[in-house]
Image (spheres, rainbow, N blue to C red):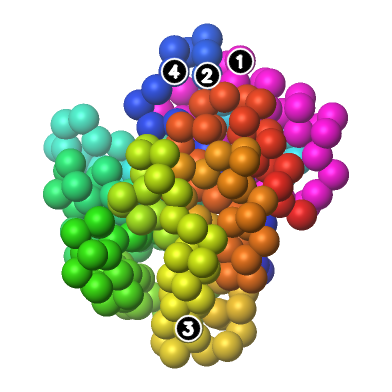
Amino acid sequence: MRKKIAAGNWKMNLSPKEAQALTSEVITMAQAEYTGHAEVIFAPPFPYLSMVHHLMKEAKGFHLAAQTLHEAESGAYTGETSAAMIVAVGATHVLIGHSERRQYFGEGNDLLAKKVDQALKHGLVPVYCLGETLEEREAGETLSVNREQLAGGLFHLSAEDFSKVILAYEPVWAIGTGKTASPEQAQEVHAFLRAEVRAQYGEEIAENCTILYGGSVKPDNAKELFSNPDIDGGLVGGASLKSRDFTEILKALP
Ligand code: PGA
């Protein structure tokens, strides 16, 4: 089912105290001020997953995500975290293929496809991120790069499995830079992604596919971005660290 979602990617930020305050504040504000039907996803750093889970587990429509996972079941992978561990501490979702993972940790589409499989095997919803760099956009490769990342990480899936995945289009040049894609630029790629999904899996799965936009989403641009027909919500970095800003972004969703 296509959903409206405000997802907060906290990245490697916040002390435990700050994480606790942020979680509680967003829940309180959302319950007092938000009347729509969008869901919230928090993606805290690994050490806070359990704590955040306990703070939010009674809050309706709030879900917990890990920021990545390892593709193996278990074993000698020092420093890594398995799908089963993520599930055990209360997460239901996992970010896969964030551009910072692609860029700084060398994660490519083949590896990401394995991570997607591992997440689905354990019942985690993959939030699969994709997007072009500035160089690729300027070279006119925006659509081909996005197609390659979409197909490379996901099109091996059965229709049933693909329908569980959430997409997040995040142009790399807009992440953490304050430069947001214009609503037209974002809508163009979202519509393209949906058309690619339609060509691969058919009309119903494409229509039901949730596609988030990420890259400098802020309270003052959220509404305009989210008013586009193919933009179903946001994956928010910087602004998700401030409870008021993140709540305002949530409130921009119906
Ligand atoms: P940003 O990050 O909102 O700080 O640009 C978005 C993301 O990386 O998910």
Inter-mark Cα distance, 1 to 3: 41 Å
Which residue has dot 1 on it? Answer: 21
**Spot occupied by residue 213 in the image (x, y as percentages of width and height):** 50, 56
- Mark 3, secondary structure of its residue: helix
Q: Which mark is residue 14?
A: 4
Q: Tell me the kind of residue under disc 2.
A: Ala
Which residue has dot 2 on it? Answer: 19
Q: Is mark 1 within 8 Å of ligand 1?
A: no
Q: Is residue 202 above or below residue 208?
A: below
Q: Are marks 2 and 1 in contact (CB under 8 Å)?
A: yes
Judge by depth and name the residue closer to the eye, 100 or 166: 100
Which one is earlier in the sequence, the residue at label 1 or at label 4? 4
Inter-mark Cα distance, 3 to 4: 38 Å
- Mark 1, secondary structure of its residue: helix
Q: Is residue 118 left or right of residue 6?
A: left
What crowding class fits label 2: few (fewer than 14 Cα within 10 Å), some (14-19), or many (20 or more)?
Answer: many
Which residue has dot 3 on it? Answer: 195
- Mark 4, secondary structure of its residue: loop
